[in-house]
Image (spheres, coloured by chain):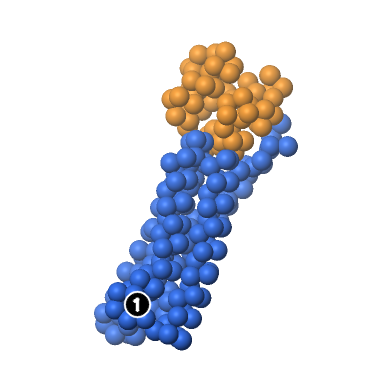
């Protein structure tokens, strides 16, 4: 699964640690999700969507979907 | 500056340190007792089992970490580490037992039991996790 986390984070001027603190997870988690090494659970995906004020499908994309 | 370890991991490290400290005391104490005043009967069983108890405590700390870690990614990494340890330990013990069955190796394990190899596997699994996450540096 692809995601726009890095772009959205940059738009907000947040570091990975800033986003991790807002989500209540480790920086390693944010890094792994950004790099596509880990697909978050549905609850964490909802939390990420809440933090950015966007629907989940505006952040997470199916493989092959344009970014 | 935020800590790199989660509260659950800090509790795990603290519990692990306690278990290992108790283990060191008990392994030397049991050895001393069996060398100088060997107990008999039920007492011998009890003294012999004592050093195993902190090892069981270590397994408990590991399962507590899996239950208490709220960061799902870190939990996954630790599950992967524990599964690697299990596969490593079972592989070593299986091969070793066959070598003993055909009398290529002598019976006994010289003190290196399943727990030793499981913890060795846990260490290698941790290294494997660290290597596969090596590019996980901070990105602004």
- Badge 1 sits on which subunit? B
- Quarter of the figure with residue B102: bottom left
The answer, for residue A64, to whether it is visible in the render is no
The chain letter corresponding to orange is A
> Label 1, on which residue?
B44
- Quarter of the figure with residue B110: bottom left
Q: Residue at x 45, y 76 (%)?
A: B30
> How many marks do you count on the picture?
1
Q: Residue at x 46, y 86 (%)?
A: B36
Query: Which of B3 and A4 lies nearest the eye of the viewer?
Result: B3
The answer, for residue A14, to whether it is visible in the render is yes
Query: Which of B6 and B48 lies nearest the eye of the viewer?
Result: B48
Q: Residue at x 49, y 24 (%)?
A: A45
The percent coordinates of residue B96 (x first, y second) are 35, 74
Query: Which of B121 and B11 lies nearest the eye of the viewer?
Result: B11
- Say left or right for A67 vs B35: right
Question: Up-down: is B38 above or below B122?
Answer: below
The quarter in which the N terminus of chain B is drawn is: top right
Question: Up-down: is B3 above or below A19?
Answer: below
Badge 1, how many Cα within 10 Å: few under 14, some, many 20+? Answer: some
Tint applied to chain B in the drawing = blue
The percent coordinates of residue B103 (x first, y second) are 29, 85
- Quarter of the figure with residue B48: bottom left
């Amino acid at each position: 699964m692809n995601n726009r986390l890095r772009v959205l984070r940059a738009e907000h001027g947040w570091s990975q640690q800033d986003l991790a603190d807002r989500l209540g997870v480790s920086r390693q988690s944010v890094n792994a999700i950004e790099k596509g090494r880990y697909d978050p659970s549905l609850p964490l995906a909802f939390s990420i969507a809440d933090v950015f004020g966007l629907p989940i499908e505006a952040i997470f994309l199916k493989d092959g979907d344009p970014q | 500056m935020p800590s790199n370890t989660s509260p659950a991991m800090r509790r795990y490290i603290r519990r692990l340190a306690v278990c290992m400290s108790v283990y060191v005391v008990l392994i030397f104490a049991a050895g001393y007792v069996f060398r100088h005043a060997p107990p008999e009967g039920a007492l011998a069983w009890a003294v012999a089992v004592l050093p195993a108890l902190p090892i069981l405590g270590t397994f408990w700390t590991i399962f507590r970490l899996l239950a208490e870690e709220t960061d799902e990614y870190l939990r996954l990494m630790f599950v992967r580490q524990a599964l690697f340890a299990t596969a490593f330990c079972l592989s070593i013990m299986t091969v070793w037992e066959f070598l003993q069955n055909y009398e290529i190796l002598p019976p006994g394990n010289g003190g290196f039991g399943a727990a030793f190899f499981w913890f060795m596997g846990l260490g290698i699994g941790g290294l494997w996790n660290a290597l596969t996450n090596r590019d996980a540096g901070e990105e602004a």
